[in-house]
Image (spheres, rainbow, N blue to C red):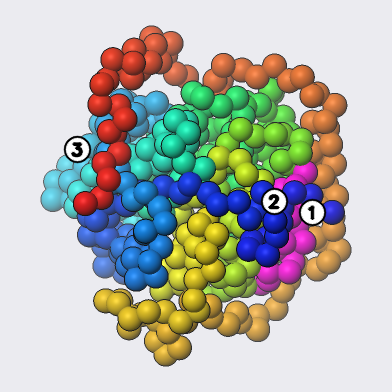
Amino acid sequence: MDGGGNSLPSVAGAAATKRRVCYFYDSEVGNYYYGQGHPMKPHRIRMTHALLERYGLLGGMRVLRPSPADDRILRRFHADDYVSFLRSANPEALSDPGALRRFNVCDDCPVFDRLYEFCQVYAGASVGAAKELNRGHADIAINWSGGLHHAKRCEASGFCYVNDIVLAILTLLEHHDRVLYVDIDIHHGDGVEEAFYTTDRVMTVSFHKFGDYFPGTGDIRDTGYGKGKYYALNVPLDDGIDDESYHYLFKPIMAKVMEVFRPDAVVLQCGADSLSGDRLGCFNLSVRGHGECVRYMRSFNVPLMLLGGGGYTIRNVARCWCYETGVALGVEVEDKVPDHEYIGYFAPDYNIHVATSNMENKNSRKSLDDIKVKLLENLSKLQHAPSVQFQERPTDMDLEEENEDQEDTNEKNDHNSDRDERPES
């Protein structure tokens, strides 16, 4: 039974209710460049924005320009020496090979022009999105430039330098007892899971390819530690999974998570490398099937943050995140892509929805059933502890009390705090 997740726009009730949506975008984001031949292309964010503009979706949202995340914000999770390294990193002056190795800044995570500025922009947007939800100014907050889930406290990983998701969740925890993180990128959300592995205030749920695949973590047996035991869920999948098989797991598992964990806010990482035809992926989801995850989580009517993530066939990334912005707004976008500056990317059919492939689905019904039974069993163990005493903050964050107190004081004294996110002109 799927529980409370009904689809838009056909149903009445929670799923059909109009949502207040805010959307973070910095017009510079498409100019950052990882380097020739690198699969991660921030240009996809600008392509997505252009589609949103031409479809008229921007008019249904508050469009906000993020305030860059400063060192103080980044150091809420990341180590001081790592933040200092990122701030000083310059492709013209790579003088310390030891630091590059220590911080895992290499081929996958190169030093490129204005790297630190890029990190400040996408992290600032996710933290800003969390603040909008905290203030009750929005029901859904979107940052397609965020979702960089592999970054660790002291090192870069998998094209990710700063873990904007962890920073956003820490911000949400200032106002919410429980935050749910859901990851539908094809890669395991290892950086986020690791950050909150020992706390019961954050539940992490990752649906990902598992077995000889980056980053190699995310075994179904990895469930959290200490107070966080059973608060990490991993859903290991094989090549070729299609919409039907994916939702055979996604909906019952997420319905049970929502029932048992009862989160005050949800962060959904919408990595688009789980789509059919991705340059680095091996799943077979359609744009509509991927978007159904957004539709389902939206239907629970809990404050929701939508973030980007992976996605390396950039025309399909733009298709997906445009469609999912429509889902957030309760709008079904027309299939025919309107004429705009990037229309050539969508040739020859110029449609939002493209056919999936005929690749083999290596996920048998038995393997899916085994996964579902195991995860629902793990979740049932949480039902026996309805009065969990939640910690003040994640134990492995190692945050200093005085820094936290100072941040609270700064926010109270900052008469411009409501102007942290500046509307795009």
Q: Secondary structure at mark 3?
A: helix
Q: Position of residue 67 (x, y in %)?
A: 27, 38
Q: Nearer the viewer, residue 148 or 168?
A: 168
Residue position marked by numbered label 1 in the rendering: 2
Could you tell me which residue is drawn at 58 percent across and 36 percent down?
265
Q: State whether residue 394 is above or below residue 406.
A: below
State the extent of the magenta-drawn residues as a range. 240-256
Task: Determine whether, in the image, residue 21 is placed left or right of residue 327.
Answer: left
Q: Position of residue 322 (x, y in %)?
A: 45, 65
Residue position marked by numbered label 3 in the rendering: 88
Could you tell me which residue is drawn at 25 percent across and 50 percent down?
424
Q: Amino acid at mark 3?
A: Ser
Q: Nearer the viewer, residue 288 or 116?
A: 288
Q: Nearer the viewer, mark 2 or mark 3?
A: 2
Task: Determine whether, in the image, residue 22 is placed left or right of residue 382.
Answer: left
Q: CA distance from mark 1 to mark 2?
A: 16 Å
N-term-proximal mark, 2 vs 3: 2
N-term-proximal mark, 1 vs 2: 1
Task: Determine whether, in the image, residue 97 is placed left or right of residue 59.
Answer: left
Quick check: is 153 in the magenta stretch?
Answer: no
